[in-house]
Image (tube, rainbow, N blue to C red):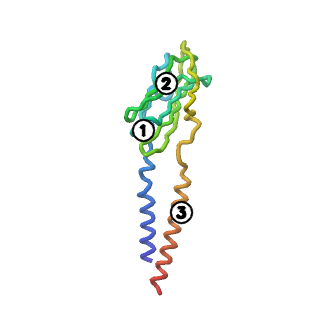
Amino acid sequence: MKRLIAVVAIVFAALLGGPATAWAHNTLVSSDPADGARLGTGPRQVRLVFDQPVRAGYDTVNVIGPNGDYWTDGKASVEGNAVTAPVRELGPKGTYTVAYRVLSNDGHPVTGEIRFTLTRAGQGTPAPPPADQADPADQESGMPIWPWIAGAVVLVVLGAVLAARLGRSGDD
């Protein structure tokens, strides 16, 4: 019985200790403009700040207007925890969505969006849709949790089987 308890304890320690770093994904902590902001004039750039550094070169930020047009004026840049994207002069008044996809230092993609409202129409014209980037709002945000659960179940079952066999061989 002591062996069974030891094996189960080792299996649970491995499960709890192993993937801890994979659970530490970036979280958006602030943005400029702020989520839900109401602006009389459009911003010249959007800035997203995360709680951890972001990997440069794997970031996508799209500003999408009320008509589905794109308003980002070039590629985003990364500096530490912040991602900044230039924005064209905005056009129609209405709700704009800032859709983003960044890569955490642990390799996990993080997607999300914020919205702001332009209360007065601007004179700007939209950008062409990005040819080399998919809309981050349409992409999944990484690996699902079910493989972790399935792996945990397999490890527990294997541990129990191993403990049962070890327990029997000691009784002979």
Which residue is disc 1 drawn over? 55
Residue drawn at (53%, 18%), measured in percent from left and top?
90
**Relative side of 144 to 49, left or right:** right
Q: Tell me residue 117's x, y (percent).
A: 53, 22
Q: How many neighbours does mark 1 have within 10 angstroms: few (below 14), some (14-19), or many (20 or more)?
A: some
Residue drawn at (44%, 41%), measured in percent from left and top?
104
Residue drawn at (56%, 26%), measured in percent from left and top?
64
Q: CA distance from mark 2 to mark 3?
A: 47 Å
The answer to whether mark 2 and mark 1 are in CB contact below 8 A is no
Amino acid, disc 3: Val
Which residue is disc 3 drawn over? 153
Q: Tell me residue 74's x, y (percent).
A: 49, 24
Q: SS for tag 1?
A: loop
Q: Quadrant of the N terminus?
A: bottom left
Q: Tell me residue 142's x, y (percent).
A: 53, 45
- The outermost residue toward the front is 132
Return the disc, 2 or 1, that comes first in the chain's sequence. Answer: 1
Q: Does residue 153 lie above or below 103 as drawn?
A: below
Q: Does residue 159 lie above or below 96 as drawn?
A: below
Residue drawn at (58%, 21%), measured in percent from left and top?
94
Q: SS for tag 3?
A: helix
Q: SS for tag 2?
A: loop
